[in-house]
Image (spheres, grey):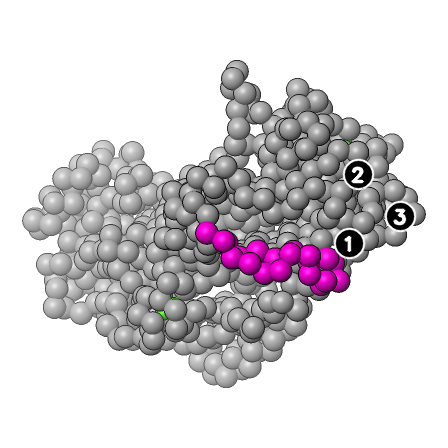
Amino acid sequence: MKKFLALAMIAGFIYNCGDKKNGLLLPFFFLGSQHTATGGLPGNSGSPGVVFVPGDGSGNPVTPPADNTNNSGGSTSTPSDSNSNSGSGNSNSGSSGNSGSSNDSNSGSSSSPSDTASNSGNSSDESSNSNSSSNSGSENNTASNGSSNNENSGSSSDNTNTGSDSNSGSSSNNSGSGSNDSSGTPTVAVVVVEDPKGDSTFNYNTTINIPLNLTVLDKKSNVVAGATVLVYDENNNILFQGVSDSSGKVTGTLTVPTSVGNVTIDISIGGESITQYISLESVLGINRTIRYEINLPASQVADTDGDGIPDDTDIYPNDATRSTEVAYPAEGVFTVAYEDSYPSAGDADLNDYVIQFKNEEDLNSSGKIVRLRGTYQHVAKGAGYRHQLFIKLPVDVGASITYKLTQADGKVEVATNTVSVSAANLKSGYQIFDDSNKTIRGQNVHPGDVFKAGFIATVEIVFNAPVERAKLGSFPYDLYAYVINTKQEIHFPGSYKNNNGTDKYLDSTGFPWAILVPGAWKYPYERYDIRKDSESGYSEFNLWVSSGGKEYKTWYYDVTNESKVFPVPSDSTLLGYLFLSVKKFAIFYALGLVIAGGIAVYFLRKKQSLVV
Ligand SMILES: [Ca+2]
Ligand SMILES: [Ca+2]
Ligand SMILES: [Ca+2]
Ligand SMILES: [Ca+2]
């Protein structure tokens, strides 16, 4: 990753130099620099010309409550005033200001990023006024108003569209340029943001799943199919890729460590690309309607396999069944640690049965999962019980599964073989490791133990038909331990309930029997309770718990007492194994300037490529 960043910085430097004469800025947000404040919504910014407005829950910009009154009064606003106002409201005013091309200005594009910002608060009275005035008379108004959001806001986008409709023929560029005056940046797209926010349930989770629901519309409010959507984290690791369907919709789930602060969404159509940067603070989902305010390019981009994903972002450019790969984690491994005394509360040494692993999914262009791969290594057995490792996948289709088991040094225990399994088999649980007495040669939990890496299982599940995220579940899926001695299954919290409604896998004190930790985690020595200050190697653990997961989100990286934790090698056998078997590079690519309709859009992109 360091190399990658260095490369990106060099590329950026070169690019910046090349364009300096134009006085253009490049958004190297992923390097940690601050984002361009193009949004009026906190936590949102984007590439030039992308405007963010709050939504009313139905994909339209929200209607400020006070507007009606003001509207009726009408008119205090001068054209210029309205411009400064809300993206929506002002669009109208913009029209008035823009002599001649009235409708164009309506297109909402009028608002410059800064404008939106000022509006978003509420106020926007003037805008509303201007809105009504300028719109008045036009049949379009009524139409838009019909949808209950009278005034500006809702109207704004509605107006926009209708406006442009009536205007049709008179160039999209107008709207952009006309409205722009103040900032000089034409509006390329208005993003209606309806992201659910709040506090997610804390159950010792170190990752969060964030549903993604996007709708892409053109400037006439028609849905746009075939828009490519790419989502990545602050280190440019791909989280999701998909293409909008015939309803203009893109759906998926982003799975990220809770410590990830921002994600980036790129949407590309015919080579035209816009970017959104989203702070994940309190974000429970990403629900957005992207309304383009420009004419979309009709140019075709190369798509060799015809799956809708252009070659330059298609990880499998010659395979129409797959278009991207998402890895969990993008680099390195996760660790799962089980307490094996269920249903009795454990001693919280979190080392009874410990596995390092990572997963990869291949998605098709609809965002459905086509294949699921996993590599698992047994790394500790701090217990007298014997365990097995399983995964349950509640899908409705069968699959063919290719499996291999080796010792840590690569010596084959079970040769590569492929079997067909039914949906019922997957639902009841597929065995990854047999008896934990046989998959590791040492316990790896006592002071002075020389670490002896355990067996490695590699699994590739090729589903008989693509499966939806809602069916499959998200990483780490339902990965569980079966304790042979007690005949008990041990799952992550959050998925199973007791008869009284409490979580089946949280004990009476609210502590889990399974915990997922990013990295090759240094779990506690045998019988050292991670919760007790005198025994814990992680003084931030209790602080993390007491904050409900909001603070000390990376407690697991911060060993505060080395004498309390097992020195698990950070360059684990599994990492070496992964590196040799599936070597991947994240390549920073497609740094470019796209000119469409006189509007310049800068975009950064990342492409992963497979080097097998
Ligand atoms: Ca393709
Ligand atoms: Ca493909
Ligand atoms: Ca234990
Ligand atoms: Ca133990």
Q: Main secondary structure of the magenta part?
A: strand
Residue 89 picture location, percent across and down: 26, 49
Task: Classify 10 Å Cα crowding around label 1: few (below 14), some (14-19), many (20 and above).
Answer: many
Picture layout, residue 499 above or below residue 546:
above
The answer to whether residue 437 is magenta is no
Task: Classify 10 Å Cα crowding around label 3: few (below 14), some (14-19), many (20 and above).
Answer: few
Residue 270: tell me if it is visible.
yes
Q: Which residues are magenta?
A: 401-420
Q: Residue at x 73, y 57 (%)?
A: 407
Which residue position is annotated with label 1? 453
Q: Amino acid at mark 1?
A: Ala
Q: CA distance from mark 3 to mark 1?
A: 12 Å
Q: CA distance from mark 3 to mark 2?
A: 12 Å
Q: Say whether disc 3 or disc 2 marks the residue closer to the N-terminus.
A: 2
Which residue position is annotated with label 3? 449
Q: Residue at x 62, y 60 (%)?
A: 415
Which residue position is annotated with label 2? 382
Residue in the foreground of this view, choosing between 90 and 196: 196
